[in-house]
Amino acid sequence: MPLEKDIFWDWTLALDMAAAANKTYTWGSFDCIVWALDVTHDCTYTDIPQGDGKVDLAANIRGTYADAAGAAARVAALTGGGGLIEFLHSLWSTYTMKRVPLTWTQRANLVVVNAPDPQFSIGGKALGVVEVRGEQVVIPGAVGLVRVPIQNWIVALDTHHPTVDHTKCIFAPAPKNEGDPPYGSITAADVFPGLAFNLPFTG
């Protein structure tokens, strides 16, 4: 089941980053795995005959644990005893993603990193997303997102797959939650300065 980037994926990535700015790290709902997979869900679609073409990659993860030990146990259960790298490999095979060299990563790619803060990690690692500038990986921190430089990246996957039928992409995605502004009313000036890329930098 190959995934393709939605026509609005770059805006969606920026909006997802902005929406995460004040969220508190919560295992099972706003942690590195769930957030990264939710971003991938928001930024991609698949060529399936029914529904809106969206795939909830976190369906078998979200809400199934409440702490780091539970997250590690859930990942191990899904990978036959593996960790985040093996979990990423399972996405690779299931969704026909491409493993890419770290220096070739692009915005919205999934990346396993060495986590800067062990308390917000699974076995010392975290799953993140390449941010809107394409320079850093962002992962949830204690509050909001933190950036992780390439020196701490381990393995990356590109969610883009060129064989999906582009005519079936979502051309007018609805706001995610009641009260959210529609995409058309948001400009780059609204989104990017809001991020300002003043995220904590971890070396």
Image: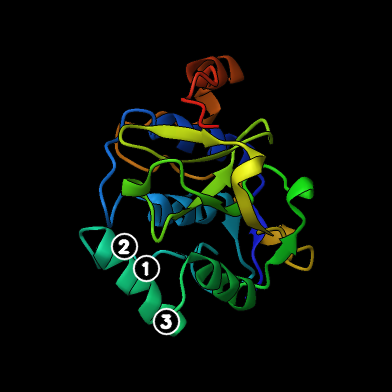
Q: Position of residue 127 (x, y in %)?
A: 49, 54
Disc on the earlier residue, 3 or 2: 2
**What label does residue 62 carry, if any?**
2
In the rendered structure, which amino acid carries the disc numbered 2? Answer: Arg
Q: Secondary structure at mark 1?
A: loop
Q: Position of residue 93 (x, y in %)?
A: 63, 78
Label 1 or label 3, whichever lies nearer to me, is 3
Disc on the earlier residue, 1 or 3: 1
**What label does residue 20 carry, if any?**
none
Q: Residues within 10 Å of mark 2 (few under 14, many from 20)?
A: many
Work out whether 193 lies above or below 9. above
Q: Secondary structure at mark 2?
A: loop
Work out whether 53 lies above or below 96. above
- Identify residue for label 1: 59
At 52% from the left edge and 23% from the top edge, which residue is drawn? 186
In the rendered structure, which amino acid carries the disc numbered 3? Answer: Gly
Q: Nearer the viewer, residue 93 or 156?
A: 156
